[in-house]
Image (cartoon, coloured by chain):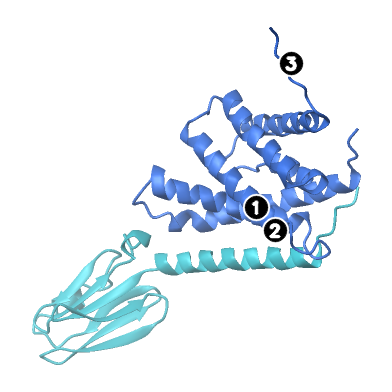
Amino acid sequence: MTLPVPRPGDWLVLAAGLALIVGLWLRQADSLEGRVVVRLDGQVFQEAGLRLNRVIEVPGPLGISRIEIRDGRVRVAEDPGPHQLCVRQGWIPPGGAAVCLPNRVSVENAATGYDTLNY
Amino acid sequence: MTIELHASEEDRRVAGLAAAAIGLTLAEAAIPLPIPGVKPGLANIITLVVLYRYGWRTAAWVAGLRIFAGALALGQFLTPAFVLSLSGGVASLLVLALAVRLPAGWFGPVSLSLLAAFAHIGSQLLVVDAWLLPGVSLFAILPLFLTAAWITGLVNGLAAAHLLRTWRPA
């Protein structure tokens, strides 16, 4: 018994279907990836994914707060506030947040609970 | 007074083919499957072969009889499972009616099987979304079901292509 060979258009349909599926998987993986929401004065200053390492500089009333995203984690690396509470908090766990109150900056690690319902 | 029903050649053929499809449906119901809603849909091989051999009308009869009789035999008649099966069957038959007009030298049973499988699961997810689980986002499970439809569509299409080459009905 030999397997029937698909016709040229069949390969096309198969490839198109596969492309659609891969696209959907990728999109889903993207939407499930952690998000970081940085707020200044309660307003969203910047949203970022956890995938790319970067430093976000937020100009608050006291100076610049530096938010560091590295290796899929996020923390407040530097803050002009007097007590350094948000800096000492260290890496923010998924679902957690750090608030630098004097500088009116907050960082939320929205990794968990981020699904298609609240997309 | 007796009522006589005369079964034409066509009627007997439809009955025989539908019986084969129902047999596959019942056999398939005995296979344990890890995810609810994902199943091979082996009876669709029959639908495809009938579509090529005897045309869309006969295929629609065979698929329709299989859906009703299969549901009755499995005790699913008029349950949500039956409504899902019916909506999937109707959607795939509509898509097949269009797809069978594609140039046959280019698009064979595999294309038709894949398109029908996608239409099948697509309409089922729409029914689930609109009626069974309104308000729940089904987007998250879409890739999983489409992947399953892709695989079963391919396998069923190859099976149908093989049958079309080798099977000569009595």
Label 3 crowding class (10 Å Cα cut-off): few <14, some 14-19, many 20+? few
Q: Secondary structure at mark 2?
A: helix
Nearer to us in this view, B50 or B150? B50
Quarter of image, res A96: bottom left
- The residue shown at (61%, 42%) is B39
Residue B81 image point, x, y percent: 51, 36
Nearer to us in this view, A2 or A16? A16
The disc, 1 or 2, on the residue closer to the chain's N-terminal end is 2
Label 2 crowding class (10 Å Cα cut-off): few <14, some 14-19, many 20+? many
Q: Mark 1 highlights which residue?
A: B116
Q: Mark 3 highlights which residue?
A: B4
Do pointers 3 and 1 mark residues of a single chain?
A: yes
Amino acid bearing label 3: Glu
Residue A117 numbered tag = none
Residue B12 image point, x, y percent: 79, 28
- The residue shown at (76%, 33%) is B14
Q: Which chain is cyan?
A: A
Q: How far separated are the C-alphas under marks 2 and 3? A: 39 Å
Question: Disc 3 vs disc 1: which is toward the camera?
Answer: 3
Amino acid bearing label 2: Ala
* Rendering colour (chain B): blue
Q: Is residue B30 above or below residue B134?
A: above
Q: How far separated are the C-alphas under marks 3 and 1? A: 38 Å
Do pointers 2 and 3 mark residues of a single chain?
A: yes
Mark yes or no: residue B31 visible: no
